[in-house]
Amino acid sequence: MRSNRATVRAGVSLAATLPMVAGALVLGIPAAHAAGHSGRQAVTGTKPAWATAKADKGATADSAQVTARVYLAGRDAAGLAAYAKAVADPSSPSYGKYLSAEQAQTRFGATKAQVAAVTSWLKSTGLKVTSVTPHYVAVSGDVAAAEKAFGTQLHNFAKGAKTYRAPAQQASVPQELRDAVLTVTGLDNAPHKSDHKDQLPPPDAVFKNAGPFSTYYGSKTAKTLPSAYGQKVPYAVKGYTGKQLRAAYGAGKYTGKGVRVAITDAYASPTIAFDAATYAKKNGDKPWKTGQLHQSLPAQYTRTEECKAAGWYGEETLDVEAVHAVAPDADVTYVGAASCYDDDLLDSLSKVVDNHLADIVSNSWGDIEANQTPDLAAAYDQVFQFGAVEGIGFYFSSGDNGDEVANTGTKQVDTPANSAWVTAVGGTSLAVGKGNKYLWETGWGTDKASLSADGKSWDGFPGAYTSGAGGGTSKTVAQPYYQKGVVPNALATANNAAGNRVVPDIAAIADPNTGFLVGQTQSFPDGSQQYAEYRIGGTSLAAPVIAGVQALAQQANGGKAIGFANPAIYSQYGTKVYHDVVDKPTGKDLAVARVDFVNGIDATGGLSVSLRSLGKDSSLKAVKGYDDVTGVGSPAKGYVDSYRRRH
């Protein structure tokens, strides 16, 4: 296991851990409760949808082991949700009247009596209490004790090709604890984990892009390659850098000075300080100041092989370098989770809120909505609502597989981006021209066709779908008030006549074919560790770019926190503060030529030449107005300044 010692390298300071604020709490609205039996109250959402009678394989052995968390509802869950809405709504008299973490705890957090009562009850059932926090009480024990505690039988159920344990009925709690318990997680043992959104191979093994490149969009035309859509196409850019992104999204004079941004991922790159400093120096970004970059890490990591820990290093590197490229004076804190599992990621989010480590939180990870269970959704929303009352906004990448049909066979959105309490960030293909001039954007969606053997055509033109910005209509989350009147009814009601949450809310550069240049220490074939740069994309790029733009906007707002941004984002819908992104911004189909090393590092293994068509995102379309690829659009020149007018 790597050491978590503080590191100072090239002027960048990383603190291994940050102190917890005593009493800080992140609790939200409880899951719906239903009348139970024998003086008990059912906790709905604790039986997963896949635990059906048809899939039931019989009772789980009494001796099997269970680990679970009982999340606490707090003093006033309904009041928390109401206040979270009010402080984020520009039309509310409470807009911007945030609470400190201590004030939020006092007003909405669990009481000592609630914590004591839940703890006492769990111990009385024979379960071992392994952890007591302001958020939850964690327990472990055998199946027999868990069944006694939660009033349900645990059975084995088929889920796809595998079998997992889950409650045969909704869990329940004693009637006298109905107001103290938010939800219970861990009774089913299907994997509850998230993936990072990189579109390129994990950079623990070296990856480089082959040329030729464009230095800006259209600077180098592929004259010797076949035409596409009636014209010669440009080579893909080498990778945009900070100056180009700042110009594209209207940074102006703002640098994010005085604003704190947090980034959450799993694990932590051991070379982040060196890589971030080297990248800034080589690519014209402002040098990092001593103490400007921090890390808050757990005492130890778990599931490193299962979660492919080294693959997360590139995610942290991308997020840190992208935020700094857009907002070079912002203070950045990286909060690493102990694993890629939801419980650990929830803990990292809670740490940000408990300690108010930042006002803006970038999160480039998630899972498909079908894998999310209502118990975990309630726990996540709780954190996001406490963040909202404290003036903290969460930004989540919307996913990299479009409508997810090609990936899962089912049309669906990603989570936690589907939460009504976060800003879901979609993706675009970005064209920045000569002199850092913004030219256009399309919705990110890629069709790939390879060069024919004779070099005279593109095989199967325009080729197969490879990737694109996640989006669409949730099947589980109701339509939030701020989307009403903006999101087209056909999208909102796609799964439910009453209307559901549609993703995303806003968008930025994501297409790896018009992507961002990132620099990282990688492992070379000779066994050496060397710094190298490569182009990358995905909505894992879009999320930190938007976080950086929000840092600029907060500076323009006189430093006052923007908080949960969606009501403000939608209140400016249809104005010039957004680029209204469409799939054919020039009126024609668009594409770039891309050349890759077959072995990922050099030409000794040969070259692969392909055509990448833009604006082809599965069944999703970027159209005039709101759409489920780019939301309200991407930030235009007036976006940041619009917050100055509010101050």
Image: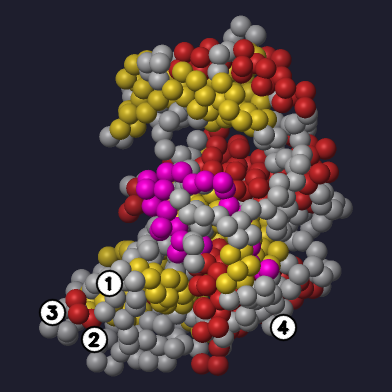
Q: Dot 4, how many residues are within 10 Å of its Cα: few (below 14), some (14-19), or many (20+)?
A: few
Q: Nearer the viewer, mark 2 or mark 3?
A: 3
The amino acid type found where label 4 is placed reads Lys
Name the residue that disc number 4 marks: 253
Query: Residue at 83% of width from left, 37% of height from top?
Result: 106
Q: Nearer the viewer, mark 4 or mark 2?
A: 4
Alpha carbons under labels 4 and 2: distance apart: 43 Å
Where, by quadrant of the figure, is residue 548 drawn? Answer: bottom right
* Sequence-first disc among 4 and 2: 2
The amino acid type found where label 1 is placed reads Asp
Name the residue that disc number 3 marks: 453
Alpha carbons under labels 1 and 2: distance apart: 37 Å
Q: Nearer the viewer, residue 410 or 434?
A: 434
Res 336 visible: yes
Alpha carbons under labels 2 and 3: distance apart: 12 Å
Image coordinates of residue 439 in percent, x first then y, are 52, 84
Provide the residue span drawn in magenta.
291-317
Task: Indicate the colouring scheme.
Answer: secondary structure
Q: Nearer the viewer, mark 4 or mark 3?
A: 4
* Sequence-first disc among 2 and 3: 2
* Sequence-first disc among 3 and 1: 3
The amino acid type found where label 2 is placed reads Pro
Query: Residue at 60% of width from left, 69% of height from top?
Result: 8
Where, by quadrant of the figure, is residue 543 drawn? Answer: bottom right
> The C terminus lies in which quarter of the figure?
bottom right
